[in-house]
Amino acid sequence: MQLLFTGFIQVFWLLFGAGIWYVIKLIGFGLVTYTGLNFATDTILAYVQANFDGLPVNILGMLGLLGIDKAFNILLTVFAVRLVHMGVTGGSRTTAAWKAPANTNVINGIFKA
């Protein structure tokens, strides 16, 4: 019975061991990334809020009317989305969909005076 159980575990590990290890690594990487990004954004927001606390009320009201707080949140959101996009695509950059035509004489000929 012991030999059968040991053989079953060995076969199970050979078949599914790599997949299980891959999932464990993904969960660990995702957890570390999420924790790190969460810590970084919390630190940045705390720093900005601490610096805004010393400003006079008139300047804070003006910043609120200008929408600086919303703009800052948009910038942090774009930063987080870009990091996630780089993580998903492996850091590769995308190229432009439109390419300039190879024959520029046609374009130059149309606009010549």
Image (cartoon, grey):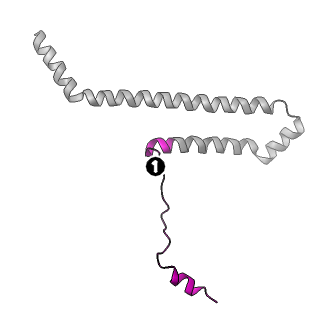
In the rendered image of this protein, does residue 10 appear above or below residue 109? Answer: above
Q: Is residue 67 magenta?
A: no
From the top left corner, tell me how far across and down residue 30 is, in percent.
Answer: 45, 31
Q: Quadrant of residue 4?
A: top left
Could you say which is closer to the camera, residue 66 or residue 111?
Answer: 111
Taking the image as shown, residue 23 lies to the left or right of residue 10, namely: right
What residue appears at the point 22 percent right and 24 percent down from the top-left corner? 13
What residue appears at the point 41 percent right and 28 percent down from the top-left corner? 27
Q: Which residue extends farthest bottom?
A: 113
Q: Is residue 98 magenta?
A: yes
In the rendered image of this protein, does residue 39 appear above or below residue 93? Answer: above
The residue that label 1 is drawn on is 92
Taking the image as shown, residue 49 lies to the left or right of residue 73, namely: right
Q: Amino acid at mark 1?
A: Ser
Q: Quadrant of residue 77?
A: top right
Q: Which residue extends farthest top?
A: 2
Q: Which residues are magenta?
A: 84-113
What residue appears at the point 61 percent right and 87 percent down from the top-left corner? 112
Could you say which is closer to the camera, residue 4 or residue 65?
Answer: 4
From the top left corner, tell me how far across and down residue 36 is, in percent.
Answer: 55, 29
What residue appears at the point 28 percent right and 31 percent down from the top-left corner? 19
From the top left corner, tell me how far across and down residue 88 is, in percent.
Answer: 44, 43
Quarter of the picture containing the N terminus is top left
In the rendered image of this protein, does residue 102 appear above or below residue 73? Answer: below
In the rendered image of this protein, does residue 30 appear above or below residue 109? Answer: above
Taking the image as shown, residue 90 lies to the left or right of residue 19, namely: right
Taking the image as shown, residue 53 lies to the left or right of residue 89, namely: right
Q: How many marks?
A: 1
Q: Quadrant of residue 113?
A: bottom right
Label 1 SS: loop
From the top left corner, tell me how far across and down residue 102 is, in percent.
Answer: 46, 75
Label 1, residues with CA under 10 Å away: few <14, some 14-19, many ≥20: few
